Image: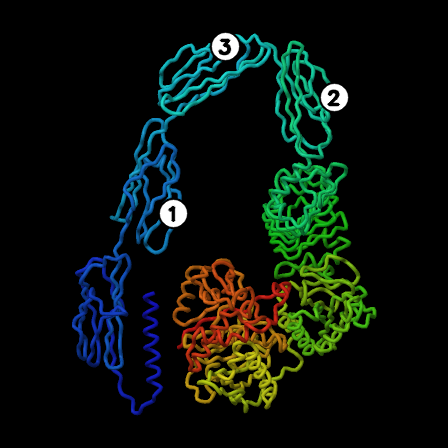
Amino acid sequence: MNARRICSLLLLFSIFQSCSEEQKIQPPTPTPKVTTSAGEISFPENGASNSVFTVTSDGPWSLSVTDTKSVPSWCRAEPSSGGKGSVQVTVTITEPNDSYDDRIAYIKIVSGSSSSFVTITQKKKDAIIVTREKVEIGEDGGALNVEVKSNIEYSVTVPEEFSGWIKRAASSNTKGLVSKNETFTISPGSMEGAREGLIIFGSGMLKDTLHVYQSCKRAIILTQSEYNLSSDAGFITVELKSNLEYNVIMPAGAEWIRLSETKALVLDKITFSIDKNSDFSRREASVIFKDKNSDISDTLRVFQSQKNAIIIGDSNLEGVSYELGQLKVGVRTNVDFSYEFLENSSEWISVSQTKALKDTVITFQLKTNGGFNRKGAVRFVSKDGVSDTLNIVQDGVKSILMDFYNSTGGSSWLKKDNWGSSSPVGDWYGVDASGDIPVSIFLYNNNLTGTIPESFSKLVSIRTISLFGNRLSGDMERLINNLSDMKKLSMLVLYTNNFYGHISASVENFENLERLSLQRNNLSGEIPAGINKLKNLTQIELYDNSLTGSIPEGIGGDNPVSVLLNKNKLKGPIPNSLLRNPNWQRMMDYIIYQDGYTIYPPKGYSRVRNIESRDLSLQPFKAYDVISNYSYTILYSYGYSCPYSDEFTGIVVDLVNKYRSKGLGAISYHACILSEPGMLQKISEYTQRKGMGNFANLLHEGKYIDNYGSTQWTDSYFLGSSGTPSVMVVNKEGELVFGYSEDMYKLPEFIKGVLGDPSERYRSSDFSKDGEVVTLQKASVGKGINITILGDGFADRDMANNGKYETRAREAMEAIFSVEPAKSLRSRFNVYCIKAVSIDETIGGNYETVFSSKYGDGSFISGSLSKIEEYALKIPGAEKIDNMVILTILNDPKHAGTCYYYTGNSSICFCPTVGFDKTYFSQVVMHEVVGHGVGKLADEYYYYGTIAPSELDVYVSDYQKYGWWANVDFTNDPAKVKWKAFLSNPLYTGKVGIFEGGFTFQLGVYRPSQTSIMQDYSYEFNAPSRAAIYKRVMELSGEGYSFEKFLEYDAVNRNASNASLTKSPLFLKKYVNLSPPVVISRR
């Protein structure tokens, strides 16, 4: 902050000095010079200290001490003045700094018009303060939160003798230097007694200590709490550990167990005598050891077998499969026995064999359970009455399905007919069943949320799971591991959900799997090599994830499979098993096109198919009839109603016109539903309007193309697509050389790389019009705000009166004033066009243009800002560019835009002509010039994560100093947000809100509306943005601003219908947003 203040003062001084120099008074008066031997001096926090620096000047001088607001009492400098030569100045600190922050003063030495500064810093007082001296912890231990106040880094020490039961868990900062929360974990107390420990917080000589006291643990603990005894008489000795006085409470009615003796040692040893069990039933007793003064106790359970016994190995069987089948039960017995089926168990349980030996396995036959979970019991009984009971809980199909229903938000499903009812499961929505057994689950596009429960794997009869198009989540590796026992599964269709993680190697256990569809999730990791073991697998759809690594060799080798792997991060080479697959040409688009790059197949395997299509006259047409006639052919997929096709079509047309004589051809193709009235006519009109006469214009007859490519293979689909627009290039043999996953805006660069420069590169020779000023509009109200329009990449032949240069400037001017509030405030602006003749007509690369404009990453544009300033100052009466808005139009069709902010309230905007299309060029001009250049608004779109605190602080400072970024805020509190006045005004109910995301960040930033020109540059400015633009225009044109005046003006927007220019998300997700503004301080 100190450095920033000094830089600001020096900058102001520099500007002042620069302005003085521009007066050009003759003859020049010599300027005294004054320097200091030190620029910064730092003192410790204790007072009564001093330091000396030297002032050297060639004239009289004086000094003053200030802390930016007043003369500080704690800092003194002497002497306060001097003459020519060198003088020592003594700085004295008169009092200690008792605050917890550094404090700063400035010494300014002035000699004539020269000055110099020395920054005086007195360090803060260091402190570590624990807010309490001691704390008492109960015997159960737990978390201990300690508040420590400090303005320095410190260490936390738990002495070794206490570290076994006191451990540091975590710490967290609160605001400023005020406090820090330290968390410690305290172990449960010891039975040996109370204990005391220390926690020491220290830094150098500073220390503070917290005393921790914990009471002892009270307990009665049996070393063994259960005894299983034979039927014979005997003794048992029980060991017990306790630090309490206790009673031994014998069970009532259990005379067969008696207290024999007690030995008081470190461990109490208590002996009980046990009588012989002459009964035929097992018996048990519980002996309680209880503290005399509390409820602390422990229980001893003693079990004694009957004289003769029937013992079932596991007498409680739960989770038995719902399917028809056998259940084998191990029985140990020394008597013959028979069976008794309790309650209604015999309706679904029967015995397959009844042979009773000492060790035997009894087999029961269970019927299918198509309902809910059910319980049954079978009693094994001997002739002498000895018995044991087997309890069986059989899973029910409906219970498993209802577990799935509850885990996936069933109450919010779009359709859930009969779920949870007594109707057969085959009548439940989305369940196909064979009798009572479900065989398929079809719940796609049904708003399922949550996770698939582990119990779902019990549906072992399922052959098809189709849950695509929902919002399910969970770890895919864990899910596949859980489902891998479903051996009958033939189709696993989970695409378009939110699953994450790796694809488990257990996928190879699905031996009957025919289709695996996991596309459009968030999967990562490699494709398991074992997937090629699935011999029945004919459809593998894993595209649009983040899978990495190589494509496994052998995949798609044995069957004519469909393998769709595009839009991942996979790498080559492509396995031979795919290249040699009979469906390779059909699958190629869905394998080679990864996320932002192409895996190019080897020569001979990258040819597009030579199939018959239809032209716009519905006549048969074969692609290779065109491809074979050109060195290279552009394959262009577009949509006549797609705004981004409008933009990019101009680029393709321009390339074909420039390079046609050098062997460049073009085939365009458009999806067409011939049954839709007028569609074919609209396509034909579009190609004529866009100048596509040199193209072979074909149809995708009867098929649409989605954003990931068509999934239907018909003879009308032969070129591939990633939505519209998409572009590829093939050579004369039809081999792919430029894939549609590449940056389409690099197409001109690619064509230039393979075909060189266009046949005739025009270069300017007449610069007589360079610098000519054309007044497009004069302000009739107020002082007049200057807008200056320049152009880059325009040749001398564009400079005629009302020629191309002036036409583009007038189009830009009309775009600026086509949207409110600029539309209503137009009379307050002067608009000038200054002609700038470039040698070349193209931007970037090796081309020579006036302002050296070039593209960077995404939509970023840079150029010679100083050259632009030089031209801008040619307008009448201009001495500096402060408060001026400068637009530089690039003679190039790329969709891009960047605005540079100066702290002098001027701005320089770069806007290409955006596909040479007037409509979309206008939208970018509105966003960059009106939104950024005039209104100093922030972008409202978002793609990064959470905004960093350091960036937030800068933006807050910009708003406080300059009023920038009025359309975004960093709080969602309606009472504090910048546009709170709109939220409380009923005129804007439903029109202004608080929506998270803006300034390019998804989290921590808020904007006032879902969409606006600053969000997708295709809609109106929201109300807070209009207010910011209105305020700046009124103030710069010499009138005051008030919110009431704005409300009166804004009636024109509140009363008007919102003419939406929003674009489909399908198109928006395909393009990068415009580059954020770049802030540059005025020189």
SS at circle 1: strand
- For disc 1, the neighbor class at 10 Å (few under 14, some 14 to 19, many from 20) is some
First in residue order: circle 3 vs circle 2 = 3
Which residue is disc 2 drawn over? Answer: 352
Q: Is residue 645 at all visible to an observer of this figure?
A: yes
First in residue order: circle 2 vs circle 1 = 1
SS at circle 3: loop
Q: CA distance from mark 3 to mark 2?
A: 41 Å
Q: As displayed, is residue 242 above or below residue 73?
A: above
Foreground: 878 or 851?
878
Q: CA distance from mark 3 to mark 1?
A: 59 Å
Q: Are marks 3 and 2 in contact (CB under 8 Å)?
A: no
> For the residue marked with disc 2, what is the amino acid?
Ser
Q: Which mark is residue 171?
A: 1
User: In the displayed structure, does residue 279 sit left or right of residue 415?
Assistant: left
- Residue 764 in the image, given as x and y percentages of width and height: 58, 86
Which residue lies at the image location 56% right of the left edge and 76% below the top edge? 819
> For the residue marked with disc 1, what is the amino acid?
Ser
Query: Which quarter shows the N terminus?
Result: bottom left
- Residue 660 in the image, given as x and y percentages of width and height: 71, 77
Which residue is disc 3 drawn over? Answer: 256
